[in-house]
Image: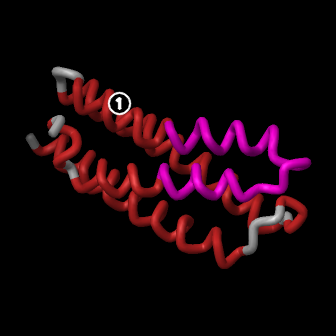
């Protein structure tokens, strides 16, 4: 197991990323190209920046990448709200809401984690 895989924030972010990627597969084929690409990339960045930040040697670098991850999370959350408001994409709110809630939880974990970095 890699060191970052032990982090609760990584585990939750990973579950979030997978859930978003699975949601992307449900998008209506004729409407999915642009939003699917952006949604996939931003969701992957949430977790990838945690992995990269944790591998960095300094607190400042770790914090910077966790902040990048937070920005990607906000981007992904916004795109989920767009999907919720646009039924033409073919994904019902009932499928989006639990993923959005998980994203909120990931955001709280990221904030708490960055605070602990500052105290070290």
Residue depicted at x 36% and y 31%: 65
Question: How is this picture coloured?
Answer: secondary structure
Residue depicted at x 66% and y 78%: 94
Q: How many marks?
A: 1
Q: Is disc 1 surrounded by few (<14), some (14 to 19) or many (20+) residues within 10 Å?
A: some
Does residue 26 show up magenta in the picture? yes
Residue depicted at x 20% and y 49%: 7
Q: Nearer the viewer, residue 42 or 62?
A: 42
Say above or below: 47 vs 13: above
User: Would residue 54 appear left or right of 47 to someone viewing this image?
Assistant: left
Q: Residue furthest top?
A: 57
Quarter of the image with the C terminus in it: top left
Q: Which residues are the magenta region?
A: 17-44
Quarter of the image with the N terminus in it: top left
* Rendering coords of residue 119 (x, y %): 12, 45
User: Would residue 39 appear left or right of 107 to someone viewing this image?
Assistant: right
Q: Nearer the viewer, residue 93 or 74?
A: 93
Residue 56: quarter of image: top left
Q: Main secondary structure of the magenta part?
A: helix
* Rendering coords of residue 42 (x, y %): 58, 40
Query: Label 1's element?
Result: helix
Does residue 84 show up magenta in the picture? no
Residue identified by numbered label 1:
64
* Rendering coords of residue 47 (x, y %): 41, 41
User: Would residue 52 appear left or right of 38 to someone viewing this image?
Assistant: left
User: Would residue 72 appear left or right of 93 to someone viewing this image?
Assistant: left
Residue depicted at x 18% and y 41%: 118
Q: Nearer the viewer, residue 43 or 57?
A: 43
């Amino acid at each position: 197991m890699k060191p970052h895989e032990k982090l609760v924030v990584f585990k939750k972010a990973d579950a979030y990323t997978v859930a978003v990627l699975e949601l992307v597969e449900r998008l209506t084929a004729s409407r999915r190209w642009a939003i699917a690409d952006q949604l996939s990339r931003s969701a992957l960045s949430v977790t990838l920046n945690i992995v990269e930040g944790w591998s960095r040697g300094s607190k400042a670098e770790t914090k910077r990448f966790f902040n990048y991850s937070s920005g990607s999370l906000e981007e992904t959350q916004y795109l989920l709200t767009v999907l919720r408001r646009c039924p033409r994409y073919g994904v019902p709110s009932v499928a989006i809401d639990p993923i959005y809630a998980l994203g909120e939880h990931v955001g709280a974990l990221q904030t708490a984690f960055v605070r602990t970095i500052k105290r070290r």
